[in-house]
Structures are given as C-alpha cells and as structure tokens.
Amino acid sequence: MGIKEDALGDKGSKALPINSKQKGNRNELEVCKWLSTWTGVEFVRVPMSGGLRWKNTIRMNICGDVVCTDYTFEFPFSIETKHYRSISFDTTSHRTLRKDSMVETLFEQCRRDAGRDGKFPMLMLRVNRMPKQEWVVVFDISHFSSSFAERYALAYSYSRELILIKSSTLKLIGYHETATHLHRRELQ
C-alpha cells in the first residue's frame, strides 16, 4: 500500500517496479543539494543510508539519512527522507491526513533517530512525478511557534501533532527565518 492510498484512500495507477534502493539513493542526493542551497552549508548522505550512528570527539553527531559536513554549523534537525510511488496531501478537503496515515509511522522513526542525537525530527517525503527539488516536509508541530504553523501549513496529521509544509515554501521562507520559529527548549 502506498502513502497516497494510506493517507487519502486513493489507489492511484500501478507503475512498473524500479529499484527502490537506487530511487532512495537518488532522493538522498537531491535532498543534500536542496539542504545545501537552503542553509548555505554542505550536506552529504550518511554511509549505509542512515544506518550508521556514531559520535566523534569534535561534536559531529551522525544520525539520519543526511548530515551537514561543517561541524561548526549547528543544524538543529535530524533528516529522514523517503521516496514513494504515490502520495498526495493537497487534495484533502480539510488539509488533514487520515487517522491511520503511514506518515505518522514514518515520522516516529525520524523522531527516534532525532531523539538519540538531541535534534528536531524533519521528514522529507517525495513521490514520483513531483516537481524537481520538491518534497513534503513533516515536522512536529510542538517544535514551532503557532504563527509559523498557521501561516505555512500545507496539511496536518489527524492528531494535529504533525505539520506538513512544501519544501518550496521553506525555501521561500529561508533557513534562518524557519529556525527562528523553533522552540529552543530541551528536546524530550
């Protein structure tokens, strides 16, 4: 079952299977490029596609699918990225995902990884035929100011605990402006 069907009950069209590992690797490389443009610092894929978790003595914590190469840049997010065949959020009449949406399950993995690293979880979802350099970005709504969520939300999870924002919207806002809306409290 794809995310589009899971989130919205839309079965969509059947496509021929492709190598999901290659698709995931390409997606991670594109996310690195996007994050590098958004923040102004370089990002790279984590070895073993996010399966590596280690800390060195220079404060460079490694967790998630992509990581900033500049250990002096305090990037507050742990990035998890997924690429699926089909997904659609902007056709929901109430801008709310279904109660049993897979998005919340995917976000839980991101939340666990981020918690180990003391960072905010950031899930970047991409689907086939989505415009180049576009993702649906999922955040925990409690980590942001309410004005940020109200102004930029594409959709919300059923529980209203997650906010979904287009990456093109984040690019227009800018990294530094986005970071100013983060609640700088101790992560749980």
Image (cartoon, rainbow, N blue to C red):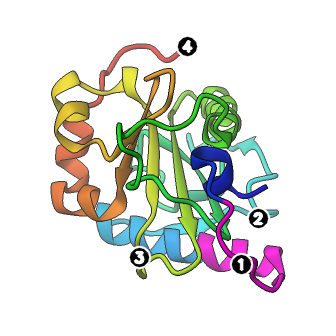
Counting from the top left corner in percent of width and height, residue 147 is at 15, 28
Q: Which residue is mark 1?
A: 23
Counting from the top left corner in percent of width and height, residue 46 is at 69, 61
Q: Which residue is mark 2?
A: 47
Return the mark for residue 133.
3
Residue in view at x 38 percent, y 20 percent:
142
Q: Which circle's residue, 2 or 1, is located before the other in the chain?
A: 1
Counting from the top left corner in percent of width and height, residue 180 is at 20, 35
Q: Which circle's residue, 2 or 4, is located before the other in the chain?
A: 2
- Relative to 33, 86 lies left or right: right
Mark whose residue sits in front, 3 or 2: 3
Mark 2 vs 1: CB contact within 8 A: no
Label 4 and label 1: CA atoms lie apart by 33 Å
Q: Which circle's residue, 4 or 1, is located before the other in the chain?
A: 1
Q: Which circle's residue, 4 or 3, is located before the other in the chain?
A: 3
Characterize the local packing of mark 1: few (<14), some (14-19) or many (20 or more) Cα atoms within 10 angstroms. Answer: some
Q: Which residue is mark 4?
A: 188
- Relative to 65, 78 lies left or right: left
Characterize the local packing of mark 4: few (<14), some (14-19) or many (20 or more) Cα atoms within 10 angstroms. Answer: few
Describe the element under mark 1 as helix, strand or loop. helix
Describe the element under mark 3 as helix, strand or loop. loop
Q: Quadrant of residue 27?
A: bottom right
Label 4 and label 3: CA atoms lie apart by 31 Å
Q: Quadrant of residue 4?
A: bottom right
Counting from the top left corner in percent of width and height, residue 70 is at 45, 59
Amino acid at circle 4: Gln
Label 3 and label 2: CA atoms lie apart by 22 Å
Q: Does residue 111 lie above or below 8 as drawn?
A: above
Q: Quadrant of residue 83?
A: bottom right
Q: Is residue 17 magenta?
A: yes
Residues in magenta, as a range? 11-28
Label 2 and label 1: CA atoms lie apart by 16 Å
